[in-house]
Image: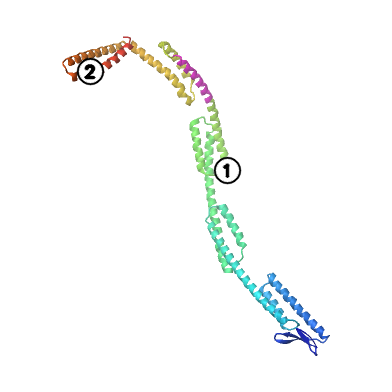
Amino acid sequence: MSSDPWGRVDETGTVYVRTADGEQVVGSWQAGSPQEALAYFERKYEGLVVEIGLLEKRVRTTDLSAKDAQAAIGHLREQVDAHHAVGDLDALRSRLDKLVETVEARREERKAQRAKQSDEARRAKEDLVVEAEQLAQSDQWRAAGERLRALVDTWKGLPRLDRKSDDELWHRFSHPRPAFSKRRKAHFAQLDAQREDARRVKERLVAEAEALSGSTDWGPTAARYRELMAEWKAAGRAQREHEDDLWNRFRGAQDVFFAARSSVFAERDAEQAENLKLKEELAEEAEKLLPIEDLKAARAAFRSINERWEAIGHVPRDARPRVEGRMHAVERALQEAEEAEWRRTNPEARARAAGLTGQLQAAVDKLRGQIEQARAQGNTSRAEKLERELEGRQALLDQALKGLQEFGG
């Protein structure tokens, strides 16, 4: 008979293993010594230890499913319960029991993780649905269209939910995209119609602009070009393939007209600058007539200067008041000299002046006599009243005498 701490072999060759429930028959050994029998069944025990260790590692470090793990545990438990090995079988059962607990815990963790992932996927898909519905109302056609396509890619990358929930959310998510496409198509159809209208309007404006390009009616034509430009801006943009060509034709027609106008204006400005120089020389010649000593000679000279002045033509607008003012000053001096000469040589005017002076002198002499009489009578108030009247008559007499002197009287 042979034995060790976990098993023994009796005289008949029967092998036993010790467990918490007592000895259990392992098998029968007739081919060798009892020690060889125990060694054989101990090796079978070590094999179970290795298999359980490997399973523990797989459960701990891989994504082995709970179902496969439970099947493997059951297979090993059958081998342990069959008592075909010699060793601490109770310890192996305890390890298998703990492994069952570990597998159950891992299954619950994975279940919770899947539930969490499902909730996150649901919230993510609901957020995508809300954003898609908002984008469907956008007028930012390019950006919104690109974002809707990106949302589809994001949706495809999310985990599926239960079939009912996933189908419901997909129905809501897929509806805004065709609605947005329909609105965008209608918008661009309307835009195309507007651009076609703009093309027709601009073709008409181009035709008129080209017809006006040869005009020499500078002011009205320039004003009409400004009106055409305002109409052009108000017309909106035509199709891209027409817009640049129409604009180049429209702008080219304007450039032809304004280049011609600028050339003419440049020649005119040069001519007016030369005219100004000539008129300044004439104004200087006229100013040399002052002061007027010989009215007849001065009048003839000014007439000659003025004839040459009128023949010269226009000067720049900003210089006109200055140069014309110089000539007007000489002309006014001549007019004043002529008026003075007329007053000096007009006999009727001289007679009227002499008569007025005589009347005023008689009135002054009479008032002086009345003042002396009033004072002699002691009538002071009357004398003062007559003196005030005398002051007025005397002033008029002094003025009349001055005018009479102008006649040489």
Question: Residue 276 in magenta?
Answer: yes
- Give SS at disc 1: helix
**The furthest residue to the bottom:** 12
User: Can you say which quadrant of the picture contains the C terminus?
Assistant: top left
Task: Give the residue at x 72% y 79%.
Answer: 76
Q: For mark 2, does the 10 Å Cα neighbourhood hold few (<14), some (14 to 19), or many (20 or more) residues?
A: some
Q: Which residue is mark 2?
A: 387
Q: Work out whether residue 169 or residue 179 is closer to the camera in this orientation and state it.
A: 169
User: Can you say which quadrant of the picture contains the N terminus?
Assistant: bottom right
Could you say which quadrant of the image residue 385 lies in? top left
Marks 1 and 2 sit apart, C-alpha to C-alpha, by 99 Å
Tell me if residue 313 comes above or below residue 158 in the rendering: above
CB-based contact (under 8 Å), mark 1 and mark 2: no
Q: Which residue is mark 1?
A: 242
Tell me if residue 101 comes above or below residue 121 in the rendering: below
Task: Give the residue at x 49% y 31%.
Answer: 219
Q: Work out whether residue 226 or residue 340 is closer to the camera in this orientation and state it.
A: 340
Q: Work out whether residue 396 or residue 265 is closer to the camera in this orientation and state it.
A: 396
The range drawn in magenta is: 268-289
Q: Is residue 274 left or right of residue 54?
A: left
- Give SS at disc 2: helix
Question: Residue 133 in magenta?
Answer: no
Name the kind of residue labelled 1 in the image.
Answer: His
User: What main secondary structure does the magenta stretch of the protein show?
Assistant: helix
Is residue 174 visible in this depiction of the protein?
A: no
Tell me if residue 196 comes above or below residue 20 in the rendering: above
Task: Give the residue at x 56% y 40%.
Answer: 247
